Image (cartoon, rainbow, N blue to C red):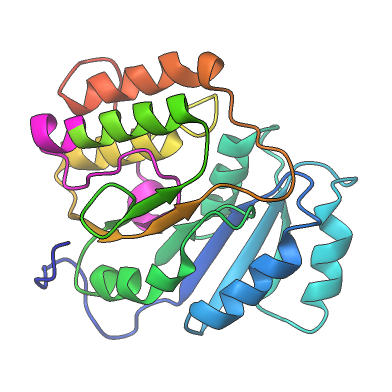
Amino acid sequence: MDRHAAPGRAHLSEPSLTLIVPVYNEAENLPALVEEVERFVPPPFTMHVVYDFDTDTTVPVARALGATRPWLRLLRNDLGPGVVNAIRAGFRAVPAGPALVMMADLSDDLRVVPECLRLYRAGYQIVCPSRYMRGGRQLGGPLVKRTLSRLAGLSLHWLAGLPTHDATNNFRLYDAALVNTLTIESTGGFELALELTAKAFRRGARIAEVPATWRDRTAGQSRFRLAKWLPRYLRWYAYAFGGRLGSA
């Protein structure tokens, strides 16, 4: 973890944090997620719960929770179905400032959010909670998926020079203005973090990481499909090494 201050933005008049949470039938998980947000995320902040369709089971639960929490807002994704478009819709609602992409399945370590914000305000444009750096951990999940993710992260760090040991964790704090200058080409879903980080790296953006613990979901069903999405990961893996397989 890089603890040195870096130039990049003024410290005064910083926009408040926005949480972008794509959901797909997360009624079971959302109340516990809101509890964790209230416990670990320093105010002020806004949380956009981004959904694809009106019958999503998350919607009534989010409305009920939002009745007493003005910072919790429902945002309908009108860019097309899927997690990539949900995250794109979230960024479209955040023109500038720190934006934290996080999942609703309680897998992410919200205890690291204050440190992520500290590094952002020190000038870093992407801050990566990392499972694979010293102090990070990964608990549960399919063995093949865990192994490939670790190999990708460590090889990109040691061989390509990416300033994080964990290139594929979608729990990530971004400078929204930076993301909104990048052309998002991902179509599958969870390769988006790798695409954005690789493009920012190739552009020379300042990237830092913090150790974090990832936990496999305990409720709901994962929409991750390794065989379908692996070729999409490989595209951005090659791009991070300098391959001409994408465009910033």
> What residue lies at 61% left-to-right and 38% top-to-bottom?
83
> What residue lies at 21% left-to-right and 47% top-to-bottom?
164
Drawn side of residue 155 relative to residue 94, left or right: left
Part of the protein shown in magenta: 155-182
Drawn side of residue 139 relative to residue 60, left or right: left
Q: Is residue 109 visible?
A: yes
Query: Residue 43: x percent and y percent?
Result: 51, 85
As displayed, is residue 20 above or below residue 182? below
Query: Which residue occupies the foreground of this view, 32 or 86?
Result: 32
Using the rendered view, name the quadrant where residue 157 is placed: top left
Quadrant of the snapshot with the N terminus: bottom left
Query: Residue 190: x percent and y percent?
Result: 50, 34
Query: Which residue occupies the foreground of this view, 88 or 61?
Result: 61
Whether residue 177 appears in magenta in the rendering, the answer is yes
Q: Is residue 175 visible?
A: no
Query: Residue 42: x percent and y percent?
Result: 47, 83
